[in-house]
Image (spheres, coloured by chain):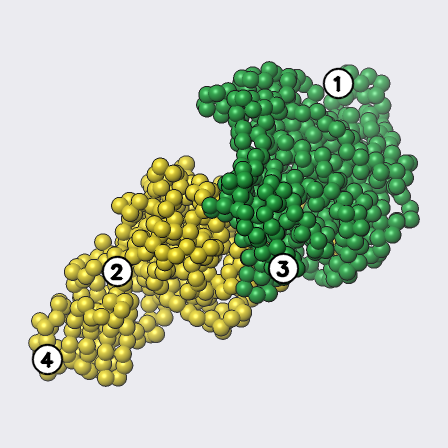
Amino acid sequence: MIPNQPIEEPVSLSMSPYTGPCTKAQAAHLLRRTMFGATNQQILSAVSNGMAATVSSLLQLPSVSPPVTYDPADGISAVGTTWINSVYPVNATAAQTTETTRLLSLAAWSMQRLNNQQLSIVEKMTLFWINHFGATATFDSRATYNYHMLLRNNALGNFKQLVKDVTIDPCMLLFLNGATNNVFSPNENYARELLELFTIGKGPQIGPGDYSHYTEEDVAAGAKILTGYIVDGLRSDTMTSPVATFLSLLHDNTNKQLSYHFGNATVSSAGATEYSNYIDIIFQQPQVATYICTKLYRYFVNYDITPAVQATVIQEMASTLIANNYSILPVMQELLTSQHFYDVALRGSIIRGPIEILFGKLNATSSAPTFNLETNANMYLSTYFFGETMGQAYLAPPSVAGWSAYYQAPAFSQLWVNSTHIKTRFDLAAYLTIFTGIAFNNQNFKINALAFVNGLSVPSDPVIVINDICEVFCPKPINAIQKAVLKSILTGGLPDFEWTVDYNAYLADPTNINVSTPVRQKVEQVLFRVFVMPEFQTI
Amino acid sequence: MKRRKFLKNVSLASVSAPILLNDIKLQGIAKKLFDVPKSAEDRVLVIIRLNGGNDGLNTVIPLDQYDQLVVQRPNIIIEETAILPLTAEVGFHPVMTGMKNMFNAGKLGIIQNVGYPEQNRSHFRSMDIWSTGMLNPNETRGWLGRHFDANYPNYPEDYPNATYPDPFAISMGFEVSSTCQGLMANFSHAVSDPFATVNLISSAQVNDGTYFGDHMAYLSTLIEQTNEYGDQINSAANAGNTLSTLYDSNNPIAVQLRYVAQMISGGLKSKVYILNINGFDTHDGQVNPTNHSTGVHADLLKTLSDAVHAFQDDLQLLNLEHRVAGMTFSEFGRQIASNASDGTDHGDAAPLFLFGACVSSGIMGQNPTVTNQIVNQAGIPMQVDFRDVYASVLKDWFQVDTTEIQTLFEHSVTYYPVLNSCNLGIKEEDELQSLLLYPNPATTSTTLRLPMDKEERVSIRIVDINGREVQSVYEGELASGVHAIHMDVANLKYGNYVVQVQRKTKNEKIQFIRVQ
């Protein structure tokens, strides 16, 4: 959005290491930008461990266990075992039932991953790639899972290799028609997006079919280069996983001529590995690094790429990426420890997306469902659908360009919120706090207000409780009136010591609902109020 | 004795008696011309976005190019016998029965080969171009947003207010429309269900000049507007009505259009409603391989056609037909040749629909030319610039001053008649000076309204699109005044024709279309 008045631009454009104070404000900023909802304890640990150590921890990728069957309708994989290498039933109708079961299991599992509490950038980085490559779930969830794991496992890995792997990933081959791209009828879909969205990016049109960094002829040549791959084993009753297979009969064996943007290079026929040679040629252009670093910057730092930011920060990131042969980790390491990243002018410059809203609430309050497998899965599915209602279905970006709030000028993240979505956000805030929460099998899952308040610095002191809450949920200090409103909700309008008395009574007898309920309800009411404040909508 | 002379000549042509209209001033002209409001203030534009790039060649099918299309797209071509003919040269996809009915009733216009110069085949860039109405990549405002900015300054801070209590535009669903992006905010208000009441907690926020402050101001204004506009929308929906029985509640666009009818009839003053249909990016599986008239693309077109047809029916029943017009757009058409996946790749120009009781004419522009030669990546060349369509809509429908319209676009605007058939009541004096043909499209007969400022010899004839005379209508003197000349066209083949009116002082012509 074009602002009312000139926006105060970041003071520091330096990418050299940040050496200023590391208080809760800086630590909370770092964790807000790299995780979905850090707890007060995690913020305090980040302060005591220091920035460098915290960033190192954030850049570790924890291993994950695969999704398991929770619904016996799978028919093949027993409840409690994973289905990721399980065949499908022979009967097509039965296979459809199996697939539905697996897709729901995958959706629930994705939410469970997002709900994990570990100090790591993995979830945020994985969502970055989901958005970057834009593929939606395909009709064999084993392929969807494998694609997801490719992005997750390489979230901080080598970008060039990731593009190569994605190019012949079965899920992507199906999504952008690579699996039906052959010498007899080239399909340009993947070839176009590979250039326009995945690697070099589209610049201004400077001539007929010439988009500054590539031409229509490159798209056509790329389609030919990529011919020959098909996907085998979809919903197979014998194969445990769908695979990409190269058939040389379907491959275009001519020499492919690229435009002057790629030095008029010719890509000669090289069968199954030709795509890799082509991607190597694309990555010889430094514009690839500029393009991906611009996207990383918009996602992690700020939508507004001023000429100064372009010339300094983005170029520095791109140089680091090229110097490290397209490895993402050093770029993130440099960015997250830079002076620029901690500039106070950038605080709160991003409006939370739906995933950020959901897990910003759940994770920061250590709230996770703790019921049986089936109940947990269904509660996570409800979470998934909340995200979808607010505009972010995790397994289905709206287009190959991803969610518009991550790329559409001039509004960018403001696009997450409009008159419909703001209402859904407010409804969700009420649902997870002052109402019953997500219900399934006579169980309820909502924000764990008591665990949350117990984890604050001095839970018996209402002033500190409100301060902690604001630091956890809001990127900048809120005004005195808002704070007074929150405290009066917590104390019921009574003097501060009344809260202290109530809280201590609860601590003395935590299982007695007569003393725990008033404390819980007051915290829930405060959290509801915080979740509908404009400040909470940003990170 | 002019009148006698005139009567004597009548029998010469296939004409029933022209009637001198001076005394009864226009009484005989189709009544619909007088049902319109006296200004464009109350008019509503409904825009339906076909997201993904609609395959124009399988939507509005050029029948005279069919043999070549069989060569170009054998695996997706619609079976010839299944096509719904509109004229001898143009047919609809078989599922578009609703829109065919509208076409025959003169309530659907088609503009052929709409696009923009130097087509960019990226969805995102193309959609930006169509949304902004600008080829300039630095433009961030939508074409309607610029128009609203010019007329409603200080949006959103000063709105809603007593003069403008309602949102300027409504975007049906969960997203605002980039066509309405203004300088400071988006003019469209997202509505998924107009019956849902809204009352959000608001808290005034100050913009402290940072990025954060900008978001705070945006969110605070949004919350306040959501509450105020929400009340207006809710009251209108509850006060409104809907009468058509044609809406299919399983058709999501029909459901949204019914909401639109409900809001308009309930008195909401929003000027623009925007709807969206996803899924037109049919790279594969566009048709069912065993029956090309069915499949994904057929389902999409049916959704559109059925919904628009029901909506038009409703508007007629609600007596709102002359206040509401609609148009579709898509970011591009698709390539002429199909691909091996039973689909089509990104192409260039495509047809665009206008609908409503006030559309100007049947089919504007010629069929695209298709050859037997498969040219890699070839699309349909543009003949009508989409920006001229936007400009013409603003001129015809919202009566926007042409000086303002020109400032909204970067190229020199050409105006086409798109939605001007109801404008007589508004600019009566201007319109009285020109020809009018009604109904148009015509089935068996139509009437030419011919104003004569003095007695003069007149020659009236019907020619085909190649300029060949197919029927002589009238030769002789006509007195001063406005004449209504009835023309029997039942013997003409279906298609486009031009009525030429020649006299010593001027030559005029008007296009019409003969339909089944």
* Tag 4: amino acid: Lys
- Earlier residue among tags 1 and 3: 3
SS for callout 3: loop
Give the quarter of the figure containing the N terminus of chain B. bottom left
Same-chain status of marks 4 and 2:
yes
Compute the Cα span from label 1 to label 4: 105 Å
SS for callout 2: strand
* Discs 4/2, front: 2
Please name the residue that numbered disc 2 is placed on. Answer: B495
Q: Is residue B506 above or below residue B509?
A: below
Please name the residue that numbered disc 1 is placed on. Answer: A514
Compute the Cα span from label 4 to label 3: 78 Å
As drawn, the label of residue B5 is 4
Q: Colour of chain A?
A: green
* Tag 1: amino acid: Asn
Residue beneath the point at 61% across and 48% down: A194
